[in-house]
Amino acid sequence: MTTTTTLCHSTADDIVVRGRSLPRELIGKLTFTEMIYFELTGREPTPAQRAVLDACLVTLMEHGLTPSAIATRLTYGSAPEAMQGAVAAGLLGVGSTFVGSTEGCVALLAQIAGGADPLAIARGSKRLPGFGHPVHKPVDPRTVALLALARAQGLFGAHCTALERLSQAVDQVAGRAIVVNATAAVAALIADAGLPIEILRGIALISRCAGLVGHIREEQQSPAMRALWEGAEAAVPYKEQP
Amino acid sequence: MTTTTTLCHSTADDIVVRGRSLPRELIGKLTFTEMIYFELTGREPTPAQRAVLDACLVTLMEHGLTPSAIATRLTYGSAPEAMQGAVAAGLLGVGSTFVGSTEGCVALLAQIAGGADPLAIARGSKRLPGFGHPVHKPVDPRTVALLALARAQGLFGAHCTALERLSQAVDQVAGRAIVVNATAAVAALIADAGLPIEILRGIALISRCAGLVGHIREEQQSPAMRALWEGAEAAVPYKEQP
Amino acid sequence: MTTTTTLCHSTADDIVVRGRSLPRELIGKLTFTEMIYFELTGREPTPAQRAVLDACLVTLMEHGLTPSAIATRLTYGSAPEAMQGAVAAGLLGVGSTFVGSTEGCVALLAQIAGGADPLAIARGSKRLPGFGHPVHKPVDPRTVALLALARAQGLFGAHCTALERLSQAVDQVAGRAIVVNATAAVAALIADAGLPIEILRGIALISRCAGLVGHIREEQQSPAMRALWEGAEAAVPYKEQP
Amino acid sequence: MTTTTTLCHSTADDIVVRGRSLPRELIGKLTFTEMIYFELTGREPTPAQRAVLDACLVTLMEHGLTPSAIATRLTYGSAPEAMQGAVAAGLLGVGSTFVGSTEGCVALLAQIAGGADPLAIARGSKRLPGFGHPVHKPVDPRTVALLALARAQGLFGAHCTALERLSQAVDQVAGRAIVVNATAAVAALIADAGLPIEILRGIALISRCAGLVGHIREEQQSPAMRALWEGAEAAVPYKEQP
C-alpha cells in the first residue's frame, strides 16, 4: 500500500490544500487561525471554535524573558544572519518542564470526561499537572478569562467541566484553594474546541513561535543580548573543582 | 544605561503585554493575527491591515512536501517524544534559498518606492528575487489573489505599486511575461501593511511553523517517515569513490 | 548557596578548563578524545579508556543516508549560509527511535551487573533494546569489533559481561541466535570505560555531529539535496482526502 | 546523470565508509580525530596533521558560559528528555558573530598565500577578522600554543606564514601590538593541515558539540539553569513603552 499525503498539491495554476484552492478559496477568505484549524483537522472551525483557538494562541504567545526567549535572543545575537536558528533555539525549550504539564493535564481531563473520579485523581498525586503557579495566586487571571470565553461561546464542554470538577476535588484534598493555571485551561479549551489533543504541544509551538519573533523584533531595535549574557554568566561564578 | 524590555511584565494578578492586560484586554478581544501585529509593532492593526496579514500568513503556511516539511517528518519519526525538535528542524530550512528571495525583493521595492528606476533594476540582473517560478506559469495564482486583496482593502501602497512597476520593467527587458511569484507579493503586502520589513522572515517562520505542525499531525495519523526516508535514500545510490 | 560552574575560567593570560591551563596543559598535550573524556569526568582517561572511547566515537559517526543525514542535507541546501542550522537539524533526529535503544540497553546491563537475572529479563520482553537489526544478521560486525577491542584493552568489565550473559539468555528464549547490535555494544563499552551512562546520548551526539559535517562536506562538493527532495516527494503522492 | 554518495554503504556483514570496512579497518584502528579527517577528505591524516587537528578541536571546545552554553543549559532544563534539542540550541549560536571571524580570516590568509600584500590588507580595514580580543591581551595564549605546535609538527605552511606576515603588518599600521586571537590561529592551522577551508565552521561545530555535552553533564550534576535564567532576566528589567 502506498503512503500518501492529503495536505497539499500544486499544479501550474493552482495550489490545493486539503481539497480547497489556496488562491481561490483560502487566501482572503480564512483568517490565519481558521487556516490553522483547517490544516489540522480538514474542517473549518465554527465561529465559536475559532474564537476559542484564537484565545488560546493569544494566551501562550508572550511571557517575557522565559528560558525560551532568552535562548532565542542569545542565538540571534550570535547569528543574526540566520533568524530561523534563533527561533528554533527558543522553540527547543518547549518541552516537558513548561508545556509537558498541559499534556499531562489534558490526559487527566479525558479520564474524568470518560467517567474517572476526580477525587481519586486528586488524592493520587501531590502535584497535579495544570495546578499551582509560582507567581499567579490565588487565581491565574488567564484561566478566568479563558473559561469565561468558553462559556460565552457555548464551548464549555466535557473537558472544561472535568477541569472544574478536578479543581474542586484538588481544593478539597488540599484544604485550600489551589490555582488552576493557564496551561490547564488551554488544554481544556483546545479539547472542547474539537482539536485533537495529540497536537496540543504543536499549538503551543505555533503561539510561542510568534512570541519569539516578537523578541527578535525587540532585539533588532533594542539589543539585550549582551546584558542577558552578562547577567546569566555573573549569576553562576567559577569555582575550582575539589 | 540599563537595557530594558517593553514586551511583558507579570504580577500576581496580571500579565501585561506591551502595556495591555493579557487577561483583560487581549484574551478574547484580539485574534491571533491581531496579537501578532500588536506584539511586533505595539499597535493594533486596522481591519485592512489585519486582513492583509491574515492573507500573507495563510499563503505561506502549506506547500506540501518541501525540504522543510520532509525534515520535520523525518525528525518526528526519529524523536516523536520531542515534537519541538521536529518543528525546529523544519524551520531551520527557512533560509536564503527559499525565503531569501522575499527579503531581496522587498529591498528592491523599497528602492523603487524611494525613487529608483525600475527599468535600471530590471536591466541590472538576469534573475531578480521574487520573479520566476518553476511550477506556476505564466501567472502565480497566489500573487493575483494577494494583490487583489490589497487593492480591495485599500492597502495597495508604495510597495505594491513598486512591484507592479518592476514587473512591467522585467517583462519589457525579457520581451515576455515573467511570473511575479507569491513571495514577492507577500513582501509588498507586508510592507504596505505597516509591518517592519526587517521582520519579514519572522512572519514566514510563524506561518511555516503552523504548516509544519500540520505535517506532524498527518504523520501522527498516517506516518510517511519510512517512505520519505526510503524514497530519498534510493534516489542517491552509493558509488565507490575513485 | 550560590550555584557555581567548575568547567572553565578565563583571565588575561590563561584559560583554565577543569583546573588545567588550556594553552599550557591541554592544547598539543591531549587528543580530542582525551579532552572529551576530561571535560565529561574531570579525569584523563587511561590509554585503554581512550582507545575504547575512540572506538565508540568512530562506530557511531557514519551510517550513510539516515533520516538525520537527509535532514541535514535538505537544510543545508535550503540555508547554506547557516551550516550550524543544518547540523542542528540532523542532530534533532538523535532521539528515542534510533538512540533510545542504547539507553534502554545500558539500563538492563546495569541491572544485570547489579545482580538481576538475565533470563528473567530476556523472558520479560519480546523486543529488548540493543537486540535485533534489520540489515546486519546473524552478527553485527561492529559489535564483534567493539567487544574484541574491550577485551584486548582489558576493559571487558561488568557491563560487557552482562551483555554477553543477556545475549545468551535472549538466544535461549528465542531458540535461535539474535543479533546484538552495535548500540548495545557501545553502551556496554562506554559504561565499562568509566563514563557516566547518563551522558550516553551526548556521546552519540558528538559522534553524529562529526558524521553530519561529513555529509555537509559531500553536499558542498556533490550536492544531493534536490535528488533527496525529489526522491522523498515522489515516494509519498498526494491523494484527495475522502 | 545520477547523483551519488561516496560516504557509506551497508551490507549484511559489513559497513563500508569511504571505501574502508568500518568494523575491520576503522574501529580500533583510527582515533576519532583520524576518522574525522578521513570522513572529511577521504584520506588518513599524517601524524602531524592528526596532531594539529586534535589541537584545534581541543582549543575550540570549552569557553565557559558563552551564549551557546547558556542556551544549551536553559534548553536542557526546559526539556531534559530531549538532550539533542539542548545541544542543537547551543550549536545554533555558532554563527557570524563568534565564528564568522575564523572564516573571514582564512579568506585573508588565502589571499596573502596567493600573493596579496599584507600591508594593503592591514590598511584596508580597522578591524580585521581574527585580530583583537576583549580579554586576552597583549597575547592570546592559545595562539602561541597553536603556532608553536604547527612549527614543531612541520606544518607551519603557507597559511601560518601568511598569518605571521599579516600580524606584523597589522602591528605596523596600528603602531602597537594587536593580539592575534585563537580563531585566526585555528584557521591557519586547519588550512595548513590540508583540510578544506570551506568546512572550517563544521570543525568548530564538532568541537563545540563536545563542549556543550560537557555543559549538559554539569547541568545533570549541578543544575545552574534557574540561576542562569534569573540572572539573565534580572539584567533586563521591564519598562513601560513610551
Image (cartoon, coloured by chain):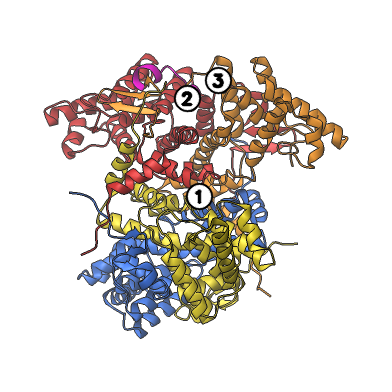
Chain colours: A blue, B yellow, C red, D orange
Q: CA distance from mark 3 to mark 2?
A: 10 Å
What amino acid does circle 1 point to?
Thr
Dot 3 surroundings within 10 Å: few (below 14), some, or many (20 or more)?
many
- Mark 2 element type: helix
Q: Which residue is mark 1?
A: B97
Residue C221 spot, x, y in % from top left: 49, 32
The magenta region covers: D22-34
Is there a contact, CB below 8 Å, between mark 3 and mark 2? no
Is there a contact, CB below 8 Å, between mark 1 and mark 3? no
Q: Is residue D166 above or below residue A30?
A: above
Residue C199, numbered circle: none
What amino acid does circle 2 point to?
Phe
**Which image quarter holds the N terminus of chain B?**
bottom right
Q: Which residue is mark 2?
A: D32
Q: Chain of mark 2?
A: D
| Nearest-to-viewer mark from 1 and 3 | 1
Q: CA distance from mark 1 to mark 3?
A: 36 Å
Q: Chain of mark 3?
A: D
Give the dominant element type of the magenta stretch: helix, strand or loop. helix
Q: Earlier in the sequence, mark 3 or mark 2?
A: 2
What amino acid does circle 3 point to?
Arg
Q: Residue at x 57, y 66 (%)?
A: B163
